Image (tube, rainbow, N blue to C red):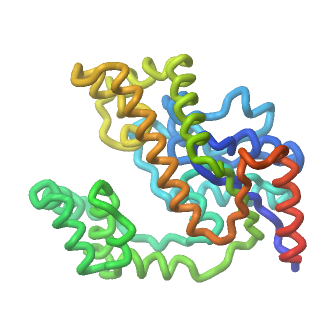
């Protein structure tokens, strides 16, 4: 029996994913499911570039539903987003997944079924204390001795993920790599059609990022970030790009101009990391915006080609 289709629109920030996703949703009389780890949070509308007028009446889900300070795991996202996918497929519609969070995209497109690993607060607190005392390099080396593959995928700035990988092993007795292997035993019940947006001239993407940050400032990003700063949260959205770059300005350690430039720099680096992640996925059909006169129709051509290939 032919599998139903689910379209994924992925790529770096500021590449035009939302615009294309809305056009596709209109074409298929469907809706958009966000795969963005920032857009899930309330009180981060400007920083996360959450769609507003861009929605054009198209239903959007998985956006702005979580309190600012709450933690939300990939497993949490996958469970909720799969329910949204099922709602569309059950009535014969083609859902559009749009976003740049690679973990979210892979959880859905690879049908990752996360194994339950209980959280042991005592173990986590012990590892956090050890991290503070020993430093990131030693903790990453400790992980490498246990789970080399997991360690190679992280760097010393990934405090939370290093601790989590160690916590998984100490709690369950299996490595994160083995957990990931066991969670990918069944293919998805749908055909994932993967569309990637990028620029052949990377500088054009960076210029769009810089312009987007300037527009965010005009829309009131500073006030939104100040409200976040007043919450003094260390979890959830507080760790995301868009607000934290202004915290040193609010504390008097940085100029406003310096904070804005830091945000632009952080966003450009994030876009580079996104592209590095997505380039590893050979299923993605890349469309280069600066080389394509009509991105939407090019996308439709790719979708038809994928459907025929998998018929």
**Residue 206: percent from the left, percent from the top?**
54, 39
Q: Which residue is nearer to you in this view: 255 or 219?
A: 255
Residue 218 visible in the shown view: yes
Q: Is 246 positioned to the left or the right of 51 in the image? A: left
Decide if residue 103 is in sight here: no
Q: Quadrant of residue 264?
A: top left
Q: Residue at x 37, y 77 (%)?
A: 149
> Where is residue 106 shown, x and y percent of the image?
58, 65
Q: Quadrant of the C terminus?
A: bottom right
Q: Nearer the viewer, residue 245 or 224?
A: 245
In this rendering, is residue 305 above or below 252? below
Q: Name the residue rendered at 44%, 46% in the picture.
A: 269
Residue 171: quadrant of the picture: bottom left
Relative to 282, say whether 278 is above or below.
above
Q: Is residue 56 left or right of residue 112?
A: right
Give the total number of marks visible in the rendering: 0
Does residue 274 lie above or below 309 as drawn? Answer: above
Left or right of 14 in this view: 272: left
Q: Out of 255 and 240, give the one closest to the viewer.
A: 255
Above or below: residue 20 compared with residue 145: above
Question: What's the residue at 65%, 54% (across, down)?
Answer: 10
């Amino acid at each position: 029996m032919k599998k139903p289709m689910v379209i994924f629109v992925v790529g770096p920030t500021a590449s035009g994913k939302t615009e294309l996703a809305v056009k596709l949703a209109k074409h298929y009389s469907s809706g958009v499911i966000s795969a963005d780890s920032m857009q899930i949070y309330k009180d981060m509308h400007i920083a996360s570039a959450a769609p507003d007028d861009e929605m054009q009446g198209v239903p959007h889900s998985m956006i702005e539903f979580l309190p600012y300070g709450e933690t939300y795991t990939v497993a949490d996202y996958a469970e909720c987003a799969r329910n949204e996918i099922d709602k569309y497929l059950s009535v014969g519609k083609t859902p559009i997944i749009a976003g740049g969070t690679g973990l979210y995209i892979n959880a859905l497109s690879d049908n990752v079924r996360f194994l339950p690993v209980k959280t042991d607060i005592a173990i986590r607190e012990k590892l956090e204390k050890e991290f503070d005392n020993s430093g990131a390099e030693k903790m990453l080396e400790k992980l490498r001795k246990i789970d080399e593959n997991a360690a190679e995928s992280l760097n010393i700035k990934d405090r939370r993920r290093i601790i989590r990988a160690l916590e998984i092993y100490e709690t369950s007795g299996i490595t994160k790599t083995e957990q990931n292997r066991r969670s990918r035993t069944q293919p998805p019940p749908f055909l994932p059609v993967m569309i990637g947006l990028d620029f052949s001239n990377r500088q054009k993407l960076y210029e769009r990022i810089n312009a987007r940050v300037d527009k965010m400032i005009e829309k009131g990003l500073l006030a939104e970030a100040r409200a976040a700063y007043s919450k003094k949260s260390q979890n959830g959205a507080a760790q995301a790009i868009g607000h934290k770059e202004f915290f040193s300005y609010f504390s008097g350690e940085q100029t406003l101009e310096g904070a804005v430039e830091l945000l632009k720099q952080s966003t450009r680096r994030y876009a580079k990391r996104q592209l590095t992640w997505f380039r590893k996925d050979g299923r993605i059909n890349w469309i280069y915006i600066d080389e394509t006169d009509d991105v939407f129709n090019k996308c439709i051509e790719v979708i038809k080609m994928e459907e025929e290939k998998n018929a």
